[in-house]
Amino acid sequence: MRLSRYFLPILKENPREAEIVSHRLMLRAGMIRQQAAGSFSWLPIGKRVLDKVCQIIREEQNRAGAIEILMPTIQSAELWRESGRYDDYGKEMLRFKDRHEREMLYGPTNEEMVTEIFRAYVKSYRDLPLNLYHIQWKFRDEVRPRFGVMRSREFLMKDAYSFDLDYEGAKAAYNRMFVAYLRTFARMGLQAIPMRADTGPIGGDLSHEFIILASTGESAVFCEKKFLDLQVPPADIDFFNNEEIARVVTEWTTPYAATEEMHDESQWASVPEEQRLSARGIEVGHIFHFGTKYSAPMKAAVMGPDGKEHFVSMGSYGIGPSRLIAAIIEASHDDAGIIWPEAVAPFHVALINMKAGDAACDGAADELYSKLTAAGIDVLYDDTEERAGAKFAIADLIGLPWQIIVGPRGIANGEVEVKNRATGERETMSVQAAIDRFGKGK
Amino acid sequence: MRLSRYFLPILKENPREAEIVSHRLMLRAGMIRQQAAGSFSWLPIGKRVLDKVCQIIREEQNRAGAIEILMPTIQSAELWRESGRYDDYGKEMLRFKDRHEREMLYGPTNEEMVTEIFRAYVKSYRDLPLNLYHIQWKFRDEVRPRFGVMRSREFLMKDAYSFDLDYEGAKAAYNRMFVAYLRTFARMGLQAIPMRADTGPIGGDLSHEFIILASTGESAVFCEKKFLDLQVPPADIDFFNNEEIARVVTEWTTPYAATEEMHDESQWASVPEEQRLSARGIEVGHIFHFGTKYSAPMKAAVMGPDGKEHFVSMGSYGIGPSRLIAAIIEASHDDAGIIWPEAVAPFHVALINMKAGDAACDGAADELYSKLTAAGIDVLYDDTEERAGAKFAIADLIGLPWQIIVGPRGIANGEVEVKNRATGERETMSVQAAIDRFGKGK
């Protein structure tokens, strides 16, 4: 993409309303624009990151056997009365009436609707296990939305729902999502640690939060350092081998790990002092097993192998992609701006023409742009007439993993500079070497 | 995808509520489920079609220079008061108050919000032209939603918005979208005819609807037969060559074409009788130029080359992907079910194992499945224990372009049958030949 034809509205000033670094950087880098309290538009580079994050989530959900659907944002109150949650849910639920005075709501989550879909079609244990997920906008009318997309009112959520005949099946489904989440966050360059969690308004008796460590994290967390050395399972792990998946879950749930609210001082005391890691964390995923909490009142039952009807045993599994992006920035930035992990970067390379209008610079930069683009590399080509210093600042701010810098002095020797945004390392090489370096990595 | 692990809830009975064929077939084929009046969940194969349709739209928008963003579904009433439309818009707008009693609405369209984004960042004509689009859910509280996703209340829309310094620039932007739409519909296997249209509540003085012909279409249309022979421009047309793009638009707007409401009997009379095509049509896209209708009241101005401030000249450009899918089915089905154009089919091939459990059939079908999948072909593999007749009926109903049928008699000779869903043509070939046929087409 040529920056001269793109829409990248960089802010020069620090926005006053931004209390945390991710919010500030997302506004400054032209990723988002606030439209109302807790409501944001995703501008072009923000949208690109959102798409990349969703695609990784999707691939790992699919790999673990979950199937993608898409439920609407608006739901009927009637459905929520069936589970009893319509009255339980407080003011966070956005309620309204349509033109025929029917009570409706903007879905804060989808347990009821997906249970309705399930019961309409699935009648036999032979059709299980089943896990349906969607990636859809949700609305929770927080009394005080803040921190940008970290705690917004309208937010994107991937929510998966598993249906099984019994607890044993449901536990296997839970384990599959547990492992899918480990893989999802690892692919985004994040160290996520599963911690036992409270089940809150979703209900149920088994729950884990996935927490990433960031010094600016929202809550205190306590865990053993050995988490940092655990291996995330490879892509070819067999998600339908229940024992193998359960072994991974055991490995990742045996060391001590707890958020502040679940913290147990006596257990913590038994962790050797040099193994204790007490840090700040950000929740990026939450999984729940809640059995028949929804299937029983909503009568979602299947015929079992015993010829009897059984209410299905369910779980739900959430990741907020919009929130996750803020969390990634909290975990990966420096004073100059964002440092994107490669897998979620809006573009792979910032190609900086230091002197647009100079024939030699233009020639080399145009060649790099067309050849790298043809090789399938996402390049943001700064072909504008800004001065070089401003271009460098923008490239650092938006945090693309690599910069290729084309300047008049280097080009006189046929050379460009390649800079790694994360390490700051710079290397001088020929134009052809730069093309080979990136074009072949693909 | 193995059908035994998939979620494809086929309905055996014709749903009584479905008045038109696309609604009936989408329900029967397990593409959608109604959740409330005019509100639908997209089940797995429906979601796959929706994704394919959106991807084609996106590619053609990008090719024409439009840039993708994503605006929220909920908007503030305040914004709509700026343009004056908050009071103009009737009961179709879903309005409500949040917990702080602020007036909000579910966006039926986004002219106001995108104008707000524009004016916040863009100050100079040098940053033009600009065209921002998003693909987002909208809500219009129709008094009588019907016809499934053809006229639903919650629906997906791709809406693009162009900003230019003056009418000449805006006309060029309009022309780019016009040509992008021709390409978009053609890629989906549709014959779409642009017809001059009324501008309705969007306002403005230039507008075209893109209409596809279908005998079950919602409205009468009148056009010259020569449209059927016009060529849609190739992918490498230069969207930034204004003259070339304008020539295409002239070519496609010169023959007579009108919907019922714009029909002019005296002009029609001058079309030679053998050239007249009077048919039924379905609107699948609508583009508008409306100049300063929003930019003037909302004060969206840029500095021109003359050093003066100019309200930008705008247009908007809509395609409803959810509605479009119903239109495709209206235009492409038979008594047995849907006939998907290849570009939007949920899977490319239905692989039917006529006798699951038979070692020879299983062996051949498994081999076909793994080799075609490895070659990047989307295969829906019916590995269930249903009887063969039911499997054929399902494959015809869901309308995948190709069927590969593995039966015990053929396999004894090492042969399978390949059926084209659209033509019904069948061909017998070796397993290897079938692998080569589909695997190499990729």
Image: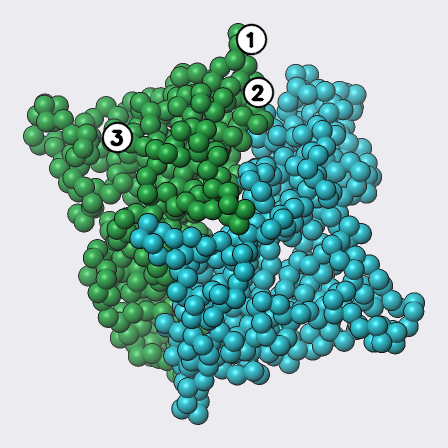
Chain colours: A cyan, B green
Q: Residue at x 76, y 76 (%)?
A: A254
Q: Which label belongs to residue B123? A: 2
Identify residue for label 3: B197
Q: Quadrant of the N terminus of chain A?
A: top right
Q: Are marks 2 and 1 in contact (CB under 8 Å)?
A: no
Label 1: chain letter: B
Q: Are marks 3 and 2 in contact (CB under 8 Å)?
A: no
Label 1 neighbourhood size at 10 Å, few (<14), some (14-19), many (20+)?
few
B234 versus B361 height, above or below: above
Label 3: chain letter: B
Q: Out of B105 and A212, give the one closest to the viewer.
A: B105
Q: CA distance from mark 3 to mark 2?
A: 32 Å
Q: Residue at x 26, y 26 (%)?
A: B253
Using the rendered image, report if marks 3 and 1 lie on a common chain.
yes
Judged from the image, the secondary structure of the residue bearing numbered disc 2 is loop
Q: Out of B409 and B373, give the one closest to the viewer.
A: B373
**On the rendered structure, is B277 left or right of A97?**
left
B347 versus A341 height, above or below: below
Q: Quadrant of residue B119?
A: top right
Q: CA distance from mark 3 to mark 1?
A: 36 Å
Q: Residue at x 54, y 31 (%)?
A: B117
Judged from the image, the secondary structure of the residue bearing numbered disc 1 is loop
The kind of residue on which mark 3 rests is Ala
The kind of residue on which mark 2 rests is Lys
The kind of residue on which mark 1 rests is Gly
Label 2 neighbourhood size at 10 Å, few (<14), some (14-19), many (20+)?
some
